[in-house]
Amino acid sequence: MASNDELTKELEAVKQDLSALRRDIVGLSDAVRTAGEQKGEAAYRRMRDQGEALRQQGEDVLERVGHRIDERPATSVLTAFGTGLLAGMLLNQRRS
């Protein structure tokens, strides 16, 4: 049978091991949190940059369309009318 001193020493060793395990878990969780934050920030920057590029492309397209409308206003009006008429006919057929 183990003596009281031996049990006390073993209990103290287990306590030290648990303390070390706690420190390791805290360190690991901090590392995981930091890595997650860094990846999240990188993903946010990529999405923001892509959104900005898409916005710029949209503005460029609108500007080109505006120039074409200014160059040929009658053609633009007829095209818009024809497109609207065709869309109305297609939607009307779906209701029937």
Image (cartoon, rainbow, N blue to C red):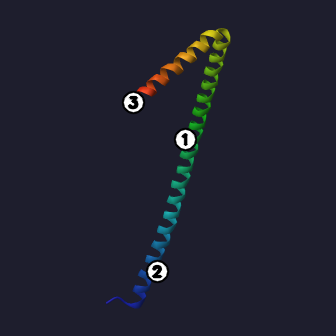
Q: Under tag 1, what secondary structure?
A: helix
Q: Earlier in the sequence, mark 3 or mark 2?
A: 2
Q: What amino acid type is highlighted by mark number 3?
A: Ser
Q: What amino acid type is highlighted by mark number 2?
A: Glu
Residue that mark 2 sits on: 12
The residue lying at 46 percent from left, 22 percent from top is: 89
Judge depth for marks 3 and 2 and give the one in front.
Answer: 3
Residue 53: x and y in percent read 60, 28
Residue that mark 1 sits on: 43
Residue that mark 3 sits on: 96
Write down the quadrant of residue 78 in the picture. Answer: top right
Q: Under tag 2, what secondary structure?
A: helix
Instruction: Tell me if residue 1 comes above or below residue 65 in the rendering.
Output: below
Residue 11 horizontal side relative to residue 85, left or right: left
Q: Under tag 3, what secondary structure?
A: loop
Write down the quadrant of residue 75 in the picture. Answer: top right
Residue 38: x and y in percent read 56, 47
The residue lying at 68 percent from left, 12 percent from top is: 70
- The foreground one among 34 and 46 is 46
Instruction: Tell me if residue 8 comes above or below residue 19 in the rendering.
Output: below
Residue 65: x and y in percent read 62, 17
- Cβ–Cβ below 8 Å for labels 3 and 1? no
User: Residue lying furthest right in this view?
Assistant: 70
